[in-house]
Image: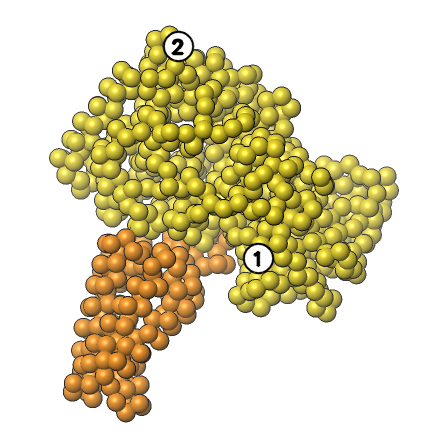
Amino acid sequence: MGRYAPIRDYAVIGDGRTVALVARDGAIDWLCLPNMDSASVFAAVLDAERGGTFELHPTQRYEAQRRYRPGTNVLETTFTTASGSVRVTDAMTLPDANLVPLRELARRVEGLSGRVAMEWRATPRFEYGKRTCLERRGEIPVAAHGSDGVAFPSWGAGTPEYRDGGVGGRFEVTAGGRALLSLIAARDEPLVLPPRAHVESRLDGTAAFWERWSARLTYAGPWRDAVVRSALALKLLVFAPSGAIAAAPTTSLPEAIGGERNWDYRYCWIRDSSFTIEALLQLGCRDEATSFFWWFMHATRLTRPRLRVLYRLDGGPDVPERVLDHLSGYRGSRPVRVGNAAAGQLQLDTFGELLDAAFGYARRGYRLDRDTVRHLADLADFVADHWRDPDTGIWEVRMEPQHFTESKAMCWVALDRAARLAEASHVSERRRARWLAEAAAIRAFIDERCWSKRLGSYVRYAGADELDASLLLMPIMRYDDPTSPRLTGTIEAVRRELSRGALVYRYAGEDGLTGAEGVFVCCSFWLAEALALAGRRDDAARSMDAALALANDVGLFSEELDPTSGDFLGNFPQGLVHLSIISAAAAIAAPPS
Amino acid sequence: MSLWAALAGGFAGTLVLTTALSGATQLRLTRMDVPFLLGTAFTDNRTAAKVVGYGLHFVAGMAFALLYYAMFLVVGRAGWLLGMTFGLLHALFAGSVLVNVILPAIHPRMGTPFTAADSSPLLEPPGFMLLNYGRATPIVTIIAHLAYGAIVGALVAAT
């Protein structure tokens, strides 16, 4: 088995269209072009032998330290060797007034002290590692496949040498010296080969943009660094051309090493996006929220009033799942999947989260036009018609559908928020009255069939005697007063039964899949937020501190953690985790209500 | 062949084309909504955008009818079948260049493949042959334009 960096060792850079994973050793092991849901050019994270990578590091032994330049998505990795130190600055650049490539990744090398010998090597592999087409065009290495092309212009980084299906070079940097490498990409058009000054200028301009963007964030409470880092990570998941928000920029990073729980998260989950909108609105990011609502209105036209669980970033509803047999998977974790079969599931909770986001958007004074309100009302009618159906729940389990408590509670939230939105819009009183009547029926169902006297808690699904961390969303989404006996009992039961230190398992029962999984990181922050809402602020702050301590060195989280080793598991970085950080910090910081 | 007939054909053809596209959206075949796309170039109010967009679409429909008329004159004959041929070319041009390339380039609220993190457009780009708006969109668009061309061709030939 080849070189696999721990998932914890990755940082991300992006430009609002695609995202690259950069390892601590300077290797870019994941990059899809031109968009984050396109096929990969570098996928060494999923197959170290044939996935393709873009390495850049000293030739001798080194220590690596890294950080994001404050308030930006520009990554700085400092390599310290026995003979000197260098700083590598990595960023996906944003367009400027010059003729710009379709996509551009810039890697600036600066000598900080002494003299450091460096080497780089790129092995582009189109179609998830299937195609190698590297050729020399003048002094610039170019790889092309179909209408896709990538090139590797470099300045002061040695003469490119071609070997073993890759290209690379060696060079030396002294204190005060600089070199620059770049990757540029094109699709359906000629490659734009920029001069060095343009790449340098765009790199600086990109850092300046991110500084301006993060300076606009309105949050001033505790854990600000973590909140700002989370907002920056979420911003990378916003697919700028359409406004859709991806759940994560990767596919098939495993939930258990060697296991089958490997999913493609490069799509827009309506649920996660709704949570994200709420989190971004808390930080004053109106443009992203408005853009998402316009995308949502357009994307769901083919399926309304039924919502697909997830949509493609371009708004398409079809996300067929297939296995890439030729990839060996992260540390042998097969299968590697692209597409996601969960798209066709019925997940009733999605409606609640979406209508709550719309309600929060309108409550902050932003306009929901008549078309949008009409569409939201149709969704509420759908919930009123279908809440009695079993579904696959928030965790999209692949077992028989159940009457999941959290799904029912979110159906209540959907109808409650729809009724409240209707008060200020042109929705008939008859529809509103029906929504309220059905909401009351849902509450009766939950209180009678989803409550366990033995546990003193709501349970995972009707008739079950087990818990589920998603129940923490009941106080968070204000299904009831978070200080009510039933919700405080549920919070305490989840804490007692599912948490191990700062970590919280999402459930204890079966889910239709073999093998185990790690602990779901977002649940730790949900617990902190629920504790704060229940009035236990000191407990909440301790939980928050403990959970944040589990982040990697640049403040990012994957979907899950191995409870024994602390290793990251699952797709990375996961939006749901980072928005739960923002939400929990805001809840703890808010004055008691 | 009369200029007025071409204008009348353009109006009637656009009426049929717009109605066909609207029907297709109601049948969940496509998310293509030409008046909405055109109108949102001028306002972010969805309702007002559709009103403005319908007006613009009719103007564009009549302008294209004049181009058809010019081509009928050059060819020296007109008819519904020749009109349909022009309609097919019109649909392919609209899907591959007009709406896919030119409209995103000039539309202030539409994303393009170049749109990056420093902007938040309100409309997704249509993609080649408008495929981002649903897989059936090219078929619907072509059928609607075939009808448009047939109407313009038939009316011009009748005068």
Residue nearest the observer in this picture, A505 or A48: A48
The quadrant of the rendering that contains the N terminus of chain A is top right
The quadrant of the rendering that contains the C terminus of chain A is top left
What residue would you read off at disc 2? A455
**Residue at image coords 57%, 64%:** A146
Is residue A152 something that shows in the picture? Answer: yes
In screen coordinates, is A211 left or right of A362?
right
| Marks 1 and 2 on same chain | yes
Q: CA distance from mark 1 to mark 2?
A: 54 Å
Nearest to N terminus: mark 1 or mark 2:
1
Residue nearest the observer in this picture, A470 or A463: A463
Q: Position of residue A485 (x, y in %)?
A: 34, 11
Is residue A176 something that shows in the picture? Answer: no
Residue nearest the observer in this picture, A181 or A130: A130
Colour for chain A in the figure: yellow
Q: Vertically, is B66 above or below A10?
A: below
The crowd level at tag 2 (other Cα within 10 Å; few <14, some 14-19, many 20+) is some
Colour for chain B in the figure: orange
In screen coordinates, is A299 left or right of A143?
left
Q: Position of residue B55 (x, y in %)?
A: 23, 66
Amino acid type of the residue that numbered disc 2 sits on in the rendered structure = Leu
Amino acid type of the residue that numbered disc 1 sits on in the rendered structure = Arg
Q: Chain of mark 2?
A: A
**Residue at image coords 23%, 76%:** B150
**Residue at image coords 63%, 57%:** A131
* Marker disc for residue A103: 1
- Badge 1 vs badge 2, beta-carbon distance below 8 Å: no
Task: Assign a secondary structure to mark 1.
Answer: strand
Instruction: Count the marks.
Output: 2
